[in-house]
Image: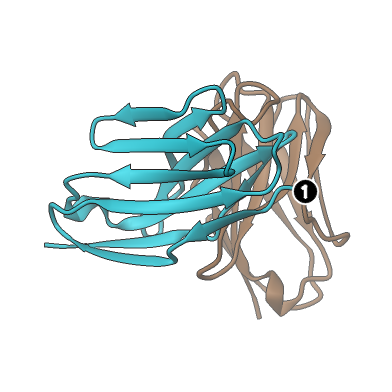
Chain colours: A cyan, B brown
Amino acid sequence: GENVEQHPSTLSVQEGDSAVIKCTYSDSASNYFPWYKQELGKRPQLIIDIRSNVGEKKDQRIAVTLNKTAKHFSLHITETQPEDSAVYFCAGNAGNMLTFGGGTRLMVKP
Amino acid sequence: DSGVTQTPKHLITATGQRVTLRCSPRSGDLSVYWYQQSLDQGLQFLIQYYNGEERAKGNILERFSAQQFPDLHSELNLSSLELGDSALYFCASSAAGVPYNEQFFGPGTRLTVL
């Protein structure tokens, strides 16, 4: 089955700096890679996703890049703000299920 | 508010007991997914139902079972509970049976096994 690894597990940045979270996956058949943000005590919410026929996708301050050959994808957040502080999860699909990475706790210091 | 509802919000029970968690998907969504999130852990996929039929199975223990009813709500049954079953259980719903439709998560049920 699919195995998704996520790094780093914690990330601390200064407000205004950029943050990058990286994930690798094992199943070359995976073709959908969503990113979820989970604030403390709340539900995960989709923030951006990318399909395997696209190399990069951007939505305001958030971008995701995908390298199918190397089987890794990354989340980039620019101009970080304190409200970006949360746990971020990447995921990859294997058939009909999503396999999530272990999560990255992002802390944005004002 | 995602439109996905889960009950109860909190559940405290003893080892060996059995509990049922309930999920109502967003209006029109046919797929329901169940996830387990232990303390400081990631999201572990348990099982997926699509329009009443089991579609995919993850690392779900034999002590756990689920079903989706004709009105599309779903229940997750956990039996012979152990301390390690204490976790946050999320359900999510999506419009179709494939994972590249956005999954909308419910608020979760926090299960504490004493």
Q: Quadrant of the N terminus of chain B?
A: top left
Task: Report the residue marked by disc 1.
Answer: A1
Query: Is A86 or B22 nearer to us in this picture?
Result: A86
Q: Quadrant of the C terminus of chain B?
A: bottom right
- The reply to whether residue A51 is visible in this rendering is yes
> Residue B78 location, x and y as percent?
77, 60
Element at badge 1? loop
Q: How many marks?
A: 1
Few, some or many residues within 10 Å of mark 1 (<14, 14–19, 20+): few
- Residue furthest to the front: A69
* B36 up-or-down from A95: above or below: below
> Residue A97 location, x and y as percent?
70, 39
Query: Is A90 or B3 nearer to us in this picture?
Result: A90
Q: Residue at x 64, y 57 (%)?
A: B36
* B98 up-or-down from B113: above or below: above
Q: Residue at x 71, y 48 (%)?
A: A2
Q: Which quarter of the picture shows residue A110?
A: bottom left
- Residue furthest to the right: B62
Disc 1 residue type? Gly
Q: Residue at x 71, y 43 (%)?
A: A27
* A22 up-or-down from A29: above or below: below
Q: Is residue B24 left or right of residue B59?
A: left
Q: Chain of mark 1?
A: A
